[in-house]
Image: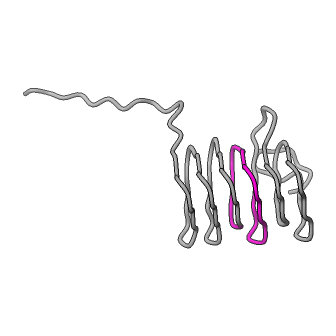
Amino acid sequence: MLGRKTKGTIDSLIGISTKIEGNVHFQGGLRIDGHVKGNVIATGDEPSMLVISEHAKVEGEVKVAHLVVNGEIIGPVHSSELLELQPRARITGDVFYKALEMHGGAIVSGKLTHDQVGEPVLKLAMSNT
């Protein structure tokens, strides 16, 4: 998967023994197995994907289109497309999402807010007959 430029692939990896202090800006796909103390933000116009593995910890804000979490995030989370919370996911902070998939065992300590921007408005027609 590394090195391919198709949708949903991982272009970069932060290894399990790596600790980063500072913000991480990326394009495409990123997998974090280590510890990041800073914001993790997807930039650019292309689709983005971030995977937080079960060993990973992020202390800071996370902004990405497609987010898969099986580790720990301490800070606000913004997912503009799909947020997948795997069984070992732990989020402490408010979560903003468009679509959510949450497995049993995942924990969110914060407010879950559904982003309704761009969704069609549902109108009900009533009949008097």
Residue in view at x 68 percent, y 61 percent: 69
* Quadrant assignment, res 57: bottom right
73 versus 96 height, above or below: below
79 versus 34 height, above or below: above
Question: Magenta stretch containing residue 53, yes or no?
Answer: yes
- Nearer-the-camera pick, 71 or 75: 75
Residue 64 in picture, x, y percent from top left: 72, 45
* Quadrant assignment, res 84: bottom right
Look at the magenta stretch and give its main secondary structure.
strand
Relative to residue 59, is residue 77 drawn left or right?
left
Relative to residue 78, is residue 33 drawn left or right?
right
Residue in view at x 88 percent, y 49 percent: 4
Residue 50 in picture, x, y percent from top left: 76, 53
- Give the extent of the magenta segment: 51-71
Question: Magenta stretch containing residue 35, yes or no?
Answer: no
The mark tally for this picture is 0
In which quadrant is the N terminus drawn? Answer: bottom right
In which quadrant is the C terminus drawn? Answer: top left
Residue 17 in picture, x, y percent from top left: 92, 71
Residue 85 in picture, x, y percent from top left: 61, 61
